[in-house]
Image (cartoon, rainbow, N blue to C red):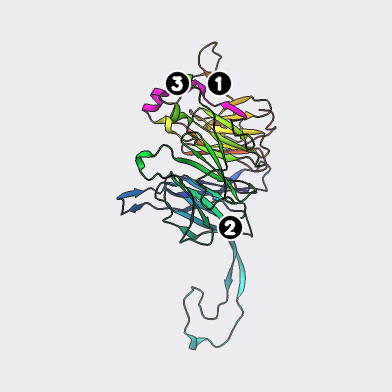
């Protein structure tokens, strides 16, 4: 995920590490190089439940920058941490009570006082944990979202959403709880949650049933009763065993303007208007050609993959991932979509991203990729779009690709 200015990009891995890339401002191409790497989480063990807690990073979110330092939140399945990222290019010298190696001097040997001075040194990037927010979730954390007030954030697991204050680690406020008295009555789980970009009292959360609930914290301390619910009526003719699985929302994002919601389910990406609850205003087919393959995708668990979706800086283009190292972009004005491929050849400097076409019957063109030859292990689940420019970051298996549009996002 990019920070608010787009000069830093953070990504996490399954080993609990966070890698931060910094944009080189002196270079015209604006390429990103490794800025800092640190271990965010370690493997842990829940002794009460006899469960191992993986160190894998689930989400990272930057805080609005207040001073020269940067702050970010990272979380694994259970524990959220606040990190401070700062630079140091000077070091103090000339202590009165310490020698040059930092050892405490014998006071009796100090015969005169001197004023310590700051001497230039090689640039050092320091990453330090400032807060650890633990014991707030019984189930796996799937979302964190920083509030526009700059003081609070929310974290969501399968059944609850908590709100935290960034300065208070020992307690949080439970703002949504959908856990039934009897777990056998459980019909849906929370899949994602996010605060509104401008209004600090509004947040939205999605469910495994494909519904979106907009909540207003001014109405009630516990937001179990939503202010608005967004859902698309199901066509009884298309009902199947897989209907509920593929309708589960894996990601939800507010537009930068705050007017729209972007959601991703297994086969489609949808745009919703906050003023219109009866259905999405736009629906884009990501990989409709997989509908006939749902049975095999269920058997290999790919049907449960959780794809993310993002807006560009002007909310005019949306992007989401697919299989075979493909990702899709859709121009909202024309409704036209394009399939692009993130592969090693395109990571060479100034290499042009190539468009791809999936062959699913009809006339086959040269270079078309057949549905049966798609590699379902090469999936693009995570991505980010620069907050002001046409620069995108694509996480494909063990590689991170950063692409810059030399033309214009409108010319997809």
Q: Nearer the viewer, residue 387 or 133?
A: 133
Residue at 68% across, 48% down: 26
Give the image location of residue 277, x and y in percent.
Answer: 60, 34
Question: Tag 2, which secondary structure?
Answer: loop
Q: Quadrant of the N terminus?
A: top right
Asked whether, in this view, residue 83 is left or right of residue 271, the answer is: left
Q: Nearer the viewer, mark 2 or mark 3?
A: 2
Residue picked out by circle 1: 357
Against 345, residue 182 (above or below) is below
Question: Tag 1, which secondary structure?
Answer: loop
Give the image location of residue 305, x and y in percent.
Answer: 44, 34
Residue picked out by circle 3: 373
Asked whether, in this view, residue 183 is left or right of residue 276, the answer is: left
User: Is residue 109 in view from this perspective?
Assistant: yes
Marks 3 and 1 close (CB-CB < 8 Å): no
Against 411, residue 125 (above or below) is below
Residue at 53% across, 53% down: 221
Q: Of callouts 2 and 3, which one flags the residue occurring earlier in the amino acid sequence?
A: 2
Q: Of callouts 3 and 1, which one flags the residue occurring earlier in the amino acid sequence?
A: 1
Residue picked out by circle 2: 151
The residues bearing labels 3 and 1 have C-alpha atoms spaced at a distance of: 13 Å
Are there few (<14), some (14-19), or many (20+) residues within 10 Å of tag 2?
few
Q: Nearer the viewer, residue 103 or 234?
A: 234
Are there few (<14), some (14-19), or many (20+) residues within 10 Å of tag 1?
some
Residue at 46% across, 39% down: 398
Q: Main secondary structure of the magenta part?
A: helix
Region rendered in magenta = 281-300
Q: Nearer the viewer, residue 357 or 193?
A: 193
Q: Of callouts 2 and 1, which one flags the residue occurring earlier in the amino acid sequence?
A: 2
């Amino acid at each position: 995920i990019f920070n608010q200015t787009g000069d830093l990009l953070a990504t996490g891995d399954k080993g609990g590490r966070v890698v931060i890339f910094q944009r080189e401002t002196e270079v015209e191409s604006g390429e990103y190089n490794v800025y800092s790497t640190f271990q965010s989480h370690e493997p842990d063990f829940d002794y009460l439940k006899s469960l191992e807690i993986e160190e894998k990073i689930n989400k990272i979110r930057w805080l609005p920058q207040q001073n020269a330092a940067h702050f970010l939140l990272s979380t694994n399945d259970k524990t959220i941490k606040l990190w401070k990222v700062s630079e140091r290019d000077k070091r103090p010298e000339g202590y009165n009570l310490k020698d040059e190696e930092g050892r405490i001097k014998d006071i009796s040997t100090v015969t005169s006082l001197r004023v310590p001075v700051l001497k230039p040194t090689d640039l050092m990037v320091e990453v330090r944990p400032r807060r650890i927010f633990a014991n707030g979730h019984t189930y796996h954390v799937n979302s964190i979202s920083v509030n526009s007030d700059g003081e609070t954030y929310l974290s969501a697991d399968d059944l609850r959403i908590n709100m935290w204050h960034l300065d208070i680690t020992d307690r949080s406020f439970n703002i949504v709880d959908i856990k039934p008295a009897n777990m056998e009555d459980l019909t849906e789980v929370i899949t994602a949650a996010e605060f509104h970009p401008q209004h600090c009292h509004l947040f939205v959360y999605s469910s495994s049933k494909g519904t979106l609930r907009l909540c207003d914290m001014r109405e009630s301390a516990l937001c179990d009763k939503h202010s608005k619910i967004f859902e698309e009526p199901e066509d009884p003719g298309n009902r199947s065993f897989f209907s509920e699985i593929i309708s589960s929302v894996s990601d939800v994002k507010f537009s930068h303007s705050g007017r729209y919601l972007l959601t991703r389910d297994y086969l489609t990406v949808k745009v919703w208007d906050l003023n219109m609850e009866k259905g999405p205003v736009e629906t884009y087919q990501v990989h409709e050609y997989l509908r006939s393959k749902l049975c095999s995708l269920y058997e290999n668990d790919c049907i449960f993959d959780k794809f993310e979706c993002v807006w560009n800086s002007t909310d005019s283009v949306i992007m989401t991932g697919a299989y075979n190292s493909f990702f899709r972009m859709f121009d909202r004005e024309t409704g036209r979509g394009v399939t692009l491929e993130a592969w090693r050849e395109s990571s060479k400097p100034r290499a042009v991203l190539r468009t791809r076409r999936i062959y699913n019957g009809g006339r086959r063109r040269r270079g078309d990729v057949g549905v049966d030859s798609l590699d379902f292990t090469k999936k693009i689940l995570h991505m980010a779009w620069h907050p002001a420019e046409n620069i995108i970051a694509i996480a494909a298996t063990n590689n991170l690709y950063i692409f810059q549009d030399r033309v214009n996002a409108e010319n997809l």
